[in-house]
Image (tube, grey):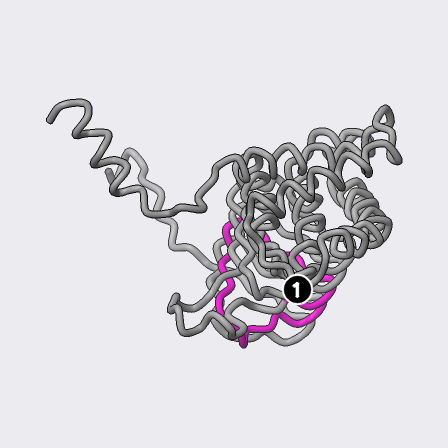
Amino acid sequence: MNKAKIIEELNRHKKQPYLDYRLKEETESFTNKLFYTLFDVNTPVAENLDILAEKFSQLVDLACWDLERPCTKVWDNYVSCLPEVLEKLNLDAEAILSCDPASLSIQEIYMAYPGFYAIAIYRLAHELHKQGFPLVPRLMTEYAHRQTGVDINPGAEIGKSFFIDHATGVVIGETAIIHDNVKVYQGVTLGALYVAKSLQKTKRHPTIMSNVTIYANATILGGETVIGENSVIGGNAWLTASVPANSTVFHTPEIKIKTAANV
């Protein structure tokens, strides 16, 4: 097959006329500038909000979003939420500092903790998701996922003072609900019992009540599964049913130790 034929065939199979990867690149740029606007002391807030407004307008155009409301109105609504988002993120950072004995300073939390970064981008994406702008929030959280190993769907609902320790491998599904003061360790999955497109409009992921700790590699599945407040879910536990408040759930492995006498 000659080059001209190859080009013809490739063009014939490119079936997504609106698949413009500039949207992904511009979303990542928007996300970085938004994060710096909230946290970096050398980034001027007033100037950057104007830049962000322009970037948001470009994202709307690239996403081919069919707006029921004017773009400026959506952006104004979003910006008005940012002070509350920043307040929540400061509480998240303080929760990490107070819970993790390895943390040395609040500056370290903001700059070096992947769990905090993943929560920050989730909270920023979630507010945009609530405005009814679906693709960009998903690209924002996927950008954080790629950098941190934490996959939080922007549709999830997460309360105050959320702590993800070590971060890598955490998965939080679209319809998960997490209340206040919850601690989650690496490898935790809050997922669905099974996947079917017909379940798109249903609650598929668990509810975690306040003051719950979920240790590494625990898996909690199902939209009707509720973990009661003040409970502790041990590492490697597998749950598909609700747990009452003040419970301790743990997985007991079978361990066999070989010695020289019985090898």
52 vs 59, left or right, is right
Asked if the magenta segment contains residue 209, the reply would be: yes
Q: Which element carries disc 1, helix, strand or loop?
A: loop
Q: Nearer the viewer, residue 262 or 91?
A: 91
Three-letter code, disc 1: Glu
Residue found at the far left of this picture: 1
Q: Which residues are magenta?
A: 208-229
Q: Nearer the viewer, residue 7 or 43?
A: 7
Report if residue 188 is visible in the image: yes
- Of helix, strand and loop, which mostly describes the magenta segment? loop
Identified at 76% across, 61% down, the residue is 180
In the rendered image, the vertical position of residue 168 relative to residue 157, given as above or below? above
Asked if the magenta segment contains residue 39, the reply would be: no
Disc 1: which residue: 68
Report if residue 109 is visible in the image: no
Q: Quadrant of residue 249?
A: bottom right
Q: Quadrant of residue 225?
A: bottom right
Q: Nearer the viewer, residue 162 or 20?
A: 20
